[in-house]
Image: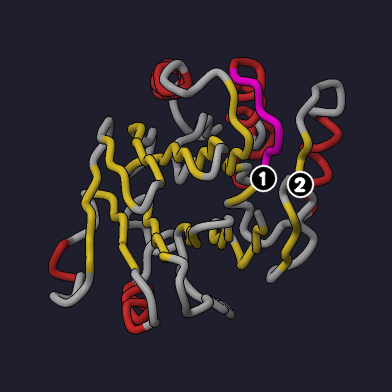
Amino acid sequence: MDCTYIGHSTFLLETKHVLLLFDYTGGPLEVKDGKKSLLVFSSHRHTDHFNETIFSLARREGNTVFILSSDIANHLVPQNVQVRWMGPYEEVSIDEVAVRTLKSTDEGVAFVLQVDGKTIYYAGDLNHWHWEGESEAYNLQMKRDYYAELRLLPAKLDIAFVPVDPRLGPFYSLGAKDLVERVKVKTLVPMHFWKDHSVCEKLKTELEDTDVTVVQLTHEIQTWRIQ
């Protein structure tokens, strides 16, 4: 499949049978018309993950379905679009794509997909958010909540889109490292790094003793092939 990094936490995946767009909020976007269905995912209501402009995609030729986290206000959704609302721990199958959700440690949901024989994990804001300004009790509870969700993931992930937020300082990679310690990840795609692309190389160095391939995102609008 081909993957295009558009910016922040926005990615477009094109598989053999379907197009998958995650947390689009803006930027250049080329979505093919035609036979392939387009599934548009929004993991939660935060403005860096959801923007109403996604609904303009309903005008494209071909089937378009919006899979929206249940925390997004329904009055923002036009009447004439196909929507599947999803809260935590729900499952649905759309155009031969099996989707289930986990509960975010911030807002909304994370998505686990089975498509074309691959298992894809899109974390949204599900992360080990360890903030230096928070209390020890808060950060401990965050750790427990994150570990609880990781236990619900499959044993193997072909592709994992994971937050590596530089605002967390030295703890920016906790969530990614926790993940690869507990789940076999083939390809890890960093996201949510606020245009600080240097964290990709930094994370690759931190995970160099693992079997994980860390995708190096160096600029926005970058496309590569995932085997």
Q: Is residue 99 above or below residue 72?
A: above
The answer to the question of whether label 2 and label 1 lie on touching residues, with beta carbons closer than 8 A, is yes
Q: Which residues are magenta?
A: 183-188
Count the numbered circles shown: 2
Q: Nearer the viewer, residue 75 or 83?
A: 83
Amino acid tagged 2: Val
First in sequence, mark 2 or 1: give its number. 1
On residue 117, which mark appears? none
| Residue type of the residue flagged with mark 1 | Val
Give above or below for 143 relative to 20.
above
Q: Is residue 187 magenta?
A: yes
Foreground residue, 128 or 225? 225
The residue furthest front is 35
Residue 92 vs residue 185: left or right? left
Is 104 in front, or is 142?
Answer: 104
Q: Residue at x 61, y 50 (%)?
A: 191
Element under disc 2:
loop
Look at mark 1 in the image and give the residue it sits on.
Answer: 189
Task: Please name the predominant secondary structure of the magenta segment in the image.
Answer: strand
Residue 197 location (% of width, % of height): 75, 56
- What whole-number distance in Å separates the C-alpha atoms at marks 2 and 1? 5 Å
* Residue shown at the point (59%, 30%) measured from the top left: 157
Residue beneath disc 2: 215
**Crowding near pointer 1: few (<14 within 10 Å), some, many (20+)?**
many
Residue 199 is situated, as x and y percent measured from the top left of the image, at 75, 47
Q: Position of residue 81 (x, y in %)?
A: 22, 72
Q: Position of residue 118 (x, y in %)?
A: 57, 38
